[in-house]
Image (cartoon, helix red, strand yellow):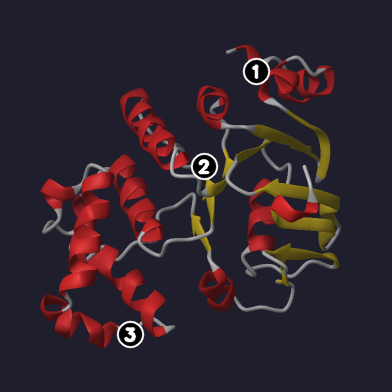
Amino acid sequence: MTADNIVLHVADVSKRFGGLQALSGIDLQIQEGTVHAIIGPNGAGKSTLLNVCIGRIRPDEGHVVFAGKTLDRQQPHEINQLGVSRVFQTPEIFQDLSLLDNVMIPAFARRDGAFRFSALRIVNSETDIREEAEFFLQDTGLYERRFDNAGSLSRGDKRRLELAMCLIQKPKLLLLDEPTAGMSRHDTNKTIELLTRIKARGMTKVIIEHDMHVVFSLADRISVLAQGRIIAEGLPEEIRGHQKVKEAYLGELHE
């Protein structure tokens, strides 16, 4: 791994909330074009780390560098404009709008530099964005429901809709926070298939995930957090047999 192909560098980042040390000296390098999984028990600091990366939380110490730009004082929308998108644990979608409108809105935001809800009034005249939105709905298996309200979707389909909303922005880095949380095994397998297709396109992805089947199906490299620290990092086969990881998970890696 060389400095030239590191797209994201979390450098010695620490964050405290009152008496809780959520992150302590985190140093993480994400290689361009890879899928990097971050795993760890509940309360390990995984979501806090992603929130630092997208500007929702400011680190107390250290800094985050994306594509050569320091993100520490950037606002979340500015970081998004630089090419970082995130899929959240709880889908952040527009429940009362159609799937098609949900996917078109981020495309307008990417083009215009802000969310402009007045753009919805000219949706039908924006042929290029509409066609692009339909492509990503097809890609995520939601095209047949494109005119349905987003609030009517199952949890799994809402997660895929939010993923389509991220993909249309053409991010350089996609952060996925528990992309299969609460899904049935059927929906989980559909999501793995979708993320495998996206992986083949070379987009860099960071995935937080508890389901080890998902992690070992997708990840090129894995970092393990416990109590706000990275306790192990390596290839999937190295992590599977790592003693500290086994102790942190109390046998979960064997499921």
Q: Amino acid at mark 3?
A: Arg
In the displayed structure, would residue 237 be above or below residue 61? above
Residue kind at label 1, given as amino acid type: Leu
Can you tell which of label 1 and label 3 is closer to the viewer?
3
Residue 123 shows in this picture: yes
Q: Position of residue 87 (x, y in %)?
A: 47, 53
Residue beneath the point at 79% across and 53% down: 3
Label 2 Cα neighbours within 10 Å, binned few <14 / some 14-19 / many ≥20: many
> Which of disc 2 and disc 1 is earlier in sequence?
2
Q: Is residue 146 left or right of residue 58?
A: left
Q: Is residue 97 visible?
A: no
Amino acid marked by disc 2: Glu
- Quadrant of residue 189 within the rendered picture: top left
Look at mark 1 in the image and give the residue it sits on: 253
Q: Which residue is depicted at the point 59% across and 32% down?
A: 219
In which quadrant will I find the C terminus? Answer: top right
Give the mark, 1 or 3, whose residue is nearer the N terminus: 3
Picture quadrant of residue 70: bottom right
Marks 3 and 2: which is nearer the front?
A: 3
Q: CA distance from mark 3 to mark 2?
A: 29 Å
Where does the image place residue 107, in percent across and percent down from the top left?
A: 33, 71
Residue shown at 73% from the left, 23% from the top: 239
Residue 157 x %, y %: 28, 44
Q: Is residue 193 left or right of residue 237?
A: left
Q: Which mark is residue 178?
A: 2
Q: Which mark is residue 116?
A: 3
